[in-house]
Structures are given as structure tokens and as C-alpha cells.
Image: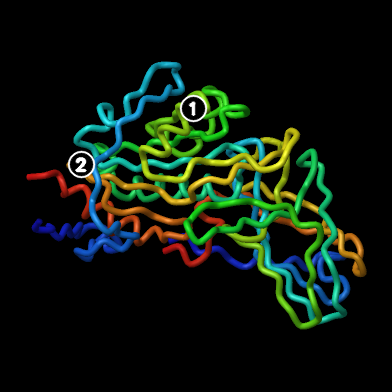
Amino acid sequence: MLVLAGLVVSACGADAGGIVITDARLGLPTGPNAALYLTAANDGPSDRLLGVETDLAAAVEIHETVTDTDGTIAMHTVDALELAEGDTLVLEPGGLHLMLVDVVRLVVGDSVVVTLDWEKAGPMPIRAEVVDPSDTLFDDG
Amino acid sequence: MLLVLVALGACGGNVASGELQGAVVDAPRPKPSFTLTDTAGEPYRFAAETEDKLTLLYFGYLNCPDICPVHLAQIAEVFDRLPDVARDAAVVFVSVDPERDSPEEIRRFLDNFDSRFVGLTGTPSELDEAQRAAGVTPAVVEGEGDEYTVDHAGWVIAYSPDGQYRVNYPFGTRQSEWTNDLQILVTMDGS
């Protein structure tokens, strides 16, 4: 079993305003789009994630996968993500994710940078590792 | 039916428990017959081509980065652990987005996971018919423009080698559950 170490980004800006990002990982692009997941813990003032900037894709959208009671899966665009003081936001497979649209070709092991745009904390560059899609899931033993 | 407990002593994490851990259906149903087109442009008669094989069927689309690649990557990883099971199995991915997913792109997509995975496409009515035959609600396009999404069945359907649909696997199924179940399903060959 592959154990993914938490990726704590301590570079300048990555913990602005009390928000700390861990476990940032990008599923290997296998089609036109790719999904980036992460955990954001906030012990500062409440904030909102408005968007994401990157040179790796034509655009980045905030999406949520929703599974209906009959097992049908739908994906919706989300305008912004709230992160209250003391809360943790988890972006993970099957739920919230950042979708990189028309993403460049990457390989497993690549390290990429995207910039999270927080309403109050401002731009926050973070680093994410490109992993096999099966390794985007934790507790997948 | 007597379930044979398969223990692979060499790899400690691959021992099957004897019970299926996926979502077992109320009553087994025969594998459906439908014909779609494979990535080489040839007709693919699903029941005939997968006869006597442990078969996994999944309906998805390439613009979906969150669920579809994870399902297929998990299966590929489990197949790496169980080469004897993989050898006689068939994984069939049907794109429910014929507007955007060309046969060439489907083939490129699947080769990220395993070049043995079969990719299928078809006309909207053929795809509709195939999904209904397989017992899933046909996919529905949501939104307009280039970035529409497709609502689709999120589970993988599993047929044992005797041609029966016995169990399905929703998103979130763990590799340990796949590993357990595939070793059990492969023994259900009607003998």
C-alpha cells in the first residue's frame, strides 16, 4: 500500500491568514481535465476560496461531485468555497475538487504549482504532486 | 453454489474472505446483449466477446476527472496484484459522451491504465440501449456549450464467468474489497 505523506507547504504565502494547506495532490491527467485535491485548515479569520490560477490549464473550476441515492453521479460548478475560522475544508475524490480544464500533459512524480485565490488572504501559491489516480484516495488499502 | 476460498500465500494482502464485499444484487441476472463499436472501429458484441470471462463494465466519460480515472486506476492496480485473475478477465469502458470522446481518445485514455481495457462508443440511441440493457439509468447531459457535464451511473458492474450479474462496486470501493471479490467471482464459472 502506498502511503501518501501529508504535503505541508511552508513556502512564503502558503499559510497566509492562518490557512494551512496539506495533502495537495493532482491526479495524473488521463483525459482533457484533471482533478486537484487538498485539505485546507483555517485557524485565522473566515475566508472564501474564489478561484485558482495556473499556467497548467486553460482554466480551473471549483467542482463538486454529487452521488444521488440511486448511485447516479453528477458534477456541479461551485462559485466559491467558504472556510470559517477553526474549520477544515477537505477536497477529495467523490466530493469537492479543483478541476483543471484542458490541462497540459504531466507524469506521475511531477511537482506543480497552482495559486489559490482567497478573498481575504489573497493569492496563495501551493505545490502539489502528480500522483496515480488511485493514489488520490486515502484509506484505499 | 460452493464458494472456493482462494488463498494466495505469496502475497499476504491478497487472501479472499469467502464473502463478496461489493454491493450484491438481490438476484443474479444474465449478462445483457448489446453491440457497440470498439476503439478500432469494429463492432463489439458485448455478451459474445466477454463470454466465460469475469467481466467489469463501466459507463463514464473522458472529461470527468474525479470518478472515472480513479475507478479504472484502482482496477488496474488490483489486476497488477492478481495477474492470474486479470488474464481471463475483461474490463469494458463505455463512453457515454460520444460528442466529445472519439475512439482514438478513448483508446489513449484507457492506455493510461491497462492496454487490455476495452473502450466502446456508439450512437446516442445505441448507448441508451446498452445502458438500459445493463440495468442502469441512461446518462444525461447537463449544461450547454463546450463544458457540459454528463450525469451517469457511478458504479462498476461485475459479471462472473458464468455470465451472471451478481455484484456492483460504487465509487469509494477499496482496493482490498476489489482484491477480495475478484478472486471469488473468478471461481463462479458454472462448474
Report the mark closest to the observer, 1 or 2.
Answer: 1
- Residue B150: x and y, percent? 60, 42
Q: What kind of residue is marked 2?
A: Pro
- Residue A71: x and y, percent? 48, 56
Q: What kind of residue is marked 1?
A: Ser
Q: Residues within 10 Å of mark 1 (few under 14, many from 20)?
A: few
Between residue A130 and residue A117, name the one nearer to us: A117
Image side of residue B176 versus residue B5, left or right = right
**Residue highlighted by disc 1:** B125
Residue found 86% across the figure and 72% down from its top: A47
**Residue highlighted by disc 2:** B161
Protein chain holding label 2? B
Residue found 39% across the figure and 55% down from its top: B169
Residue found 54% across the figure and 50% down from its top: B67
Up the image or down, B94 lies above or below A13; here it is: above
Classify mark 1: helix, strand or loop: helix
Q: How many marks?
A: 2
Classify mark 2: helix, strand or loop: loop
